[in-house]
Image (tube, rainbow, N blue to C red):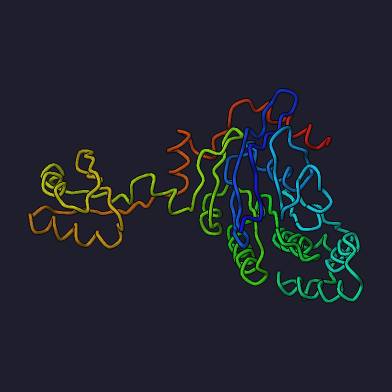
Amino acid sequence: MDIIKVNDITKNFNGFTAVNRVSFNISEGEIFGILGPNGAGKTTIISMLSTILRPTSGSGKVMGFDIKKERDNVRKTIGIVFQDTSLDDQLTGRENLDFHGRLYGVPSKKRESRIKEVLKLVDLEDKADNIVKGYSGGMKRRLEIARGLIHHPKILFLDEPTLGLDPQTRRRLWEYIKQLNKNEKMTIIITTHYMEEADFLCNRIAIIDHGKIIALNKPEKLKEVLGGDLIILDVTESERLAKYIRKEKYVKGIKLFDRKINITVSNGNKLIPKIIEFAKKRKIEVNSVMLKQPSLEDVFIHYTGRTIREEIPDGKAIMKQRMRMRGH
């Protein structure tokens, strides 16, 4: 069942198009990723779906509620963790959760039990009565996730949830997100510019650039666009090996670079021993072998011609967009 439906949604800021006719559906229980560089439109999409911003045109439904006409109903069904921290660092973790529960009208007894549940879920039980100012970055992100869950939302939006965290803390947070999805049966929408994060967490990924979706599929399907794994061999006679091996059924493509030969295949891990044995039988010495499996970074480069870390053009327009968003 589709829990979110988006059709041709667009957002303009005084002539600058931040999101350009984007359409997608998200199934119940799915972890859906929106992947792209800074300024690509990820946060704007989340802001429209969570009713913080009104779309310029197009339509969207969250849990069957129209994001333009039924904003209050949408807000009751979702939790959201913003890119920038919004905790009160003068309160304890428990007090932050209690305050948020009161805002959502969670009854006192239910609120107390729910606070215990979410603190346990994000492993902050022993830090619950500490002032948030003394929390680490990872602890603050976990508390913000707990706060977003206090009212039992059906859908959780995570906008750049691990931005600025160290790799170890980031990986730990990924595990919490997976656990949330499994144990709470929750639909989760994540925006990120970390390729490995999207690959690890998401059932499907929409890659967005310049406000448009340029690819949308399961991670493994996106990588298949590139044709398969790449086995790179440094050999004594690359031309002779290429001549023999290009006839093998498992070879999808071959490129020669002096002593090196690049062979495109499927299931590269399993085929490496077979290829080495193939060369050995023909008395071709293999000096080194490397397996390069397609990554989402490769997919992004394939579609855009640049890495996700490169700055997108028109930085002034992007800055103006963000300033206008803060004013809404």
* Quarter where residue 102 is shown: bottom right
Image quarter of residue 56: top right
Query: Foreground: 278 or 210?
Result: 210
Residue name at image x 66 percent, y 56 percent: 3
Quadrant in which the C terminus appears: top right
Tell me what residue is drawn at x 57 percent, y 40 percent.
Answer: 208
Percent coordinates x, y for residue 39 in the rendering: 64, 36
Q: Position of residue 55 (x, y in %)?
A: 74, 36
Q: Is residue 79 above or below residue 239?
A: below
Q: Position of residue 85 (x, y in %)?
A: 77, 52
Q: Is residue 80 above or below residue 54?
A: below
Q: Please identify the quarter of the rendering in which residue 310 is found.
A: top right
Is residue 25 or residue 116 the one in the foreground? Answer: 25
Q: Residue 246's x, y, as percent?
A: 16, 46
Q: Is residue 200 above or below residue 57?
A: below
Seen at 11% across and 44% down, the residue is 243
